Amino acid sequence: MCTDESHARQFLFTVEAKSYREINFEHLISSNTRVKLLEFWDQAKRDSEKVDKIPLLFVRYNQMERDLHYLFMPTKFFTQISHLIGDKYGYFKYVGSTTFTVLSSKDFFVADYNLVRKLAKSYLNG
């Protein structure tokens, strides 16, 4: 959550960050009853709904490159900004009890923030 009051109104995202020893994406398509990634995403979504912002979930595991995270975002928002982000690492869409898209934070951070923010405003008003 942005603690700078003047910027908090302008920053249209909530950010949740998780770091674990290992991340198991295969649990997303298993019968495992507790799927940590889905719990993380549900928490990010709940927090964003409280303040009418777009959830971004950054997840990493031990031994990943320092500046790399898996970035989760609503698929509908990803679709709106996909032409702005990089495509070096690819992405995937999860459809289940919830829907989100996962991409590399490195691909996301090549996007022009002002253009992303403009599309985020449109998404939220939408």
Image (spheres, rainbow, N blue to C red):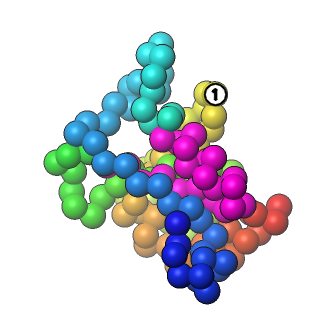
Q: Magenta stretch?
A: 40-60
Whole-percent x and y of residue 17?
Answer: 41, 54
Q: Which element type, helix, strand or loop, lies under badge 1?
A: loop
Vertical placement of residue 117 versus 98, above or below: below
Whole-percent x and y of residue 71?
Answer: 45, 53
Vertical placement of residue 97 versus 65, above or below: above
Residue 6 lies in the magenta stretch: no
Residue on which the image places disc 1: 97
Q: Residues within 10 Å of mark 1 (few under 14, many from 20)?
A: few
Measuring 45% from the left and 27% from the top, which residue is drawn there?
35
Vertical placement of residue 26 versus 98, above or below: above
Whole-percent x and y of residue 76?
Answer: 68, 51
Indicate the quadrant where residue 115 lies: bottom right
Measuring 38% from the left and 25% from the top, which residue is drawn there?
26
Residue 51 appears in the picture as rendered: yes
Measuring 30% from the left and 58% from the top, which residue is drawn there?
68
Farthest residue to the left: give it.
Answer: 63
**Camera-nearest residue between 46 and 92:** 46
